[in-house]
Amino acid sequence: MKKYILFAVVLAFNSCKNSEQNYDASGTFEADEIMVIAQATGTLLQLNLEEGQQLKTGQKVGEIDAKNVELQKEQVVASIEALGQKTNSPLPQIQVLQTQISAQSANISVLQEQLDNAVRERNRTSNLVARDAATRKQLDDANGQVLVLQKQINAAQRQLTILQQQISTAKENVSIQNKAILSERKPTQKKVEQIDEQLKNNTIESPISGMVLTKYMNQGEFAMIGKPVFKMANLDLMTLKTFITGDQLAQVKTGQQVKVFIDLGDGKTKEIPGTLYWISSKAEFTPKTIQTKNERANLVYATKIHVKNDGFLKIGMYGDVKF
């Protein structure tokens, strides 16, 4: 009986040894892990996730208190509204000038009427002088009166033109002043847009579709920019990192289809197809935790193999490869 047991142990040892020799390389499975960090500072109001939870891209999982940022936005918006109160209006000055223009226009009308009367009186005096019914002095006085009225009308019209020019100048000056004040509106509005972008950082979202690996914070804790909140990875496509010797380099190439084996226990293995997508261009000394086909090799080359995860693969799990 003891002989049969000893024979079975030796047979199992030899079979294990042979099975190990059938594999060209061994390694562990990895995944592209993403560290999700806080992009804002404040109290963590919500964090709805647990380790092992599956998340979708863009899924909202948490929120950081944005009260301080919202107060900054309100302050900037109030400053924009205050710009309208700082602007000036030319209307009061224009109204005064328009009143003066109206008065001056009325004065010109009166002077024009007086001039018309003076011209008629001069013409009448001129006729009387021609008939020796009036003196020459009376005609000279009538002509003088006409000249005086014409000068007064010309002066009033010049004054009217000046008043109209003053209205244009008042409008232009106020426009220049308001332009300088309102020039602050655009950069201030840009500050509002910048704050709106900051407010987006207060929402914590999943950057990819994948599984939550580690949760570093809990609801109610104080988050700071750059502080890790959770770590996740997409486990649909795993990476098996292995090491090969220089003798094996001639057997492999990028894009090559390989066979990956994982241990299911009780001596059973599962074969999964994989694609070798990366081979290191530099050799390195054999890591102490890595075994290669030829353990006596001092230098090895790292390789990476993509393997689609059917649910069995886990980070850190061992896998064997046959090229």
Image (spheres, rainbow, N blue to C red):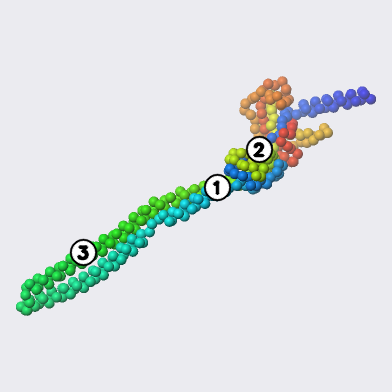
List the residue tagged with mark 3: 155
- Residue at label 2? 33
Note whether 126 is above or below 321 in the view shown.
Answer: below
Residues tagged 2 and 3 counted as in contact (Cβ below 8 A): no
Q: Is mark 3 on a helix, strand or loop?
A: helix
Between the C-alphas of marks 2 and 3, the distance is 89 Å
Residue 69: mark in rendering:
1
**Badge 1 local density, few (<14 within 10 Å), some, or many (20+)?**
some
Mark 1 or mark 3: which comes first in sequence?
A: 1
Q: Which badge, 1 or 2, is on the more N-terminal residue?
A: 2
Which image quadrant is residue 272 in? top right
How far is the residue under mark 1 from the one under mark 3?
64 Å
Disc 1 versus disc 3: nearer the observer: 1
Q: Where is residue 221 in the image (x, y as percent from the top left)?
A: 64, 42
Q: In which quarter of the image is residue 104?
A: bottom left
Real-space CA distance between mark 1 and mark 2, rounded to the nearest whole angstrom: 31 Å
**Three-letter amino acid code at disc 3?**
Ala
Residue 95 makes an appearance in the image: yes
Q: Circle 2: is it few (<14), some (14-19), or many (20+) Cα within 10 Å?
A: some
Q: Answer with the quarter of the image where residue 164 lies.
A: bottom left
Q: Can residue 250 be seen in this view?
A: no
Report the mark closest to the observer, 2 or 3.
Answer: 3
Instruction: For label 3, count other residues whose C-alpha is less than 10 Å away and answer few (under 14), some (14-19) or many (20+).
Output: few
Q: What element carries label 2?
A: strand
Nearest the eye: 264 or 261: 264
Classify 176 as above or below 49.
below
Query: Percent from the top left, x then y, of residue 213?
Result: 69, 39
Amino acid type, callout 2: Glu
